Image (spheres, rainbow, N blue to C red):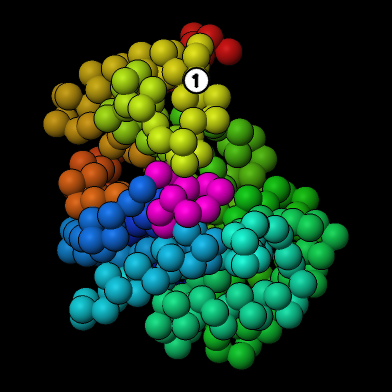
Amino acid sequence: MQTQQLGNTDMHITPLGFGSWAIGGSNWAYGWGVQDDGDAIKAIERAVELGINWIDTAAVYGLGHSEKLVAKALAGIKNKPFIFTKCSMVWNEEGQISNSLKADSIRRECEESLKRLEVDAIDLYQIHWPNPEVDLEEGWQEMAKLKEDGLVRHIGVSNFNVDQLRRVMPIAPVASLQPPYSMLRPAIEKEILPFCMENNIGVIVYSPMLSGMLSGAMTHERVANFTQDDWRRNNKEFQEPRLSANLELVDFLKNIGSLYNRSAGEVAIAWTLRHPAVTGAIVGGRNAAQVEGIIGAGEFRLNEGEVSSIESYIAGMPK
């Protein structure tokens, strides 16, 4: 896979990054159901073996568990990928999650992530959510201090809008933004992506397959059998009438992908990578086979006619 420079950093990243949300397990509010740790480690190992050169995780994924799995998976790998993680979502002894952008909290989170990841410095440290918004400047000032102290190499944000980016940029440059983006959630195209292009802010998008909906592996039966600890049970995209409409879209994507021996998920990921502001897309994998099923998106690109046909199809979907 070819690489592209991420914003104003010295990192050149592959179009695909391995996302570690789902492998965090089920013991927290936003879990994806039970996850086998062995499968998770093999998924990361396979991703790196196939050329992916960055791993995206967060302290809150599995309440620290995802970061520990990343460390285990990378322990035996000689050429380490970049490690990106996030702060600002904290939890108490009961596992209840809250948000903090206080300076001491961010520094404490960073130190704990360094221990779990077993690294001396984090390649990209990101504010996970801009909450509480009143503390945005305090939080970003501390992020800049962490970089000055050498605990992190680059600093970025996730889920920020343009106004929030403007608030923090005078304090320290923003290396990257991580927003949600898929053909069913294209809202960032209006303001956020143009702003990032104008200001040399790298963009690494998450949920390009809309949490698995557009992967090609989703069915009515599978959704009906989601376990109680799978957060997607309460997502409107996995409920009627959206569910059936989305699965019909997946069939449409499969038809496009079949011309190139690509899956619906690879078509969905390629759609996000078509935008010039997007540096890379985060793709999750709960086992090695899932990674193998999406790796082709790293080099596959849609032509203008295919992009136009997808957009026309989506325009005709029920709102």
Report x, y in % for residue 198: 62, 53
- Quadrant holding the N terminus: bottom left
In the image, 34 versus 245, the foreground residue is 34
Front residue (pair 276, 53): 53
Tell me where residue 273 sits by quadrant.
Answer: top left
| Residues in magenta, as a range | 24-33
**What residue lies at 42% left-to-right and 57% top-to-bottom?**
24
Q: Main secondary structure of the magenta part?
A: loop
Q: Please rate how many residues cluster around mark 1, counting C-alpha atoms within 10 Å: few if below 14, some from 14 to 19, many from 20.
A: some
Instruction: Tell me the element at label 1.
Output: loop
Give the x, y percent position of residue 161: 70, 48
Q: Residue furthest front?
A: 94
167 in relation to 241, above or below: below
Percent across and percent down for residue 261 are 14, 31
| Magenta-colored stretch includes residue 113 | no
Residue at the location (58% across, 78% down)? 110
Judge from the rendering whether residue 282 lies leftward or rightward of residue 157; answer left or right. Answer: left
Horizontal and vertical percent position of residue 232:
48, 34
Circle 1 residue = 239
Q: Amino acid at mark 1?
A: Gln
Identified at 36% across, 27% down, the residue is 225
Horizontal relation, residue 291 to residue 229: left or right? left
Furthest-right residue in this view: 134
Residue in the image at 45% along x and 88% along y: 120
The reply to whether residue 246 is in sight is yes
| In this rendering, position of residue 266 left or right of residue 273 | left
Q: Quadrant of the C terminus?
A: top right
Q: Vertically, is 302 above or below 176?
A: above
**304 or 9: which is nearer to us?**
9
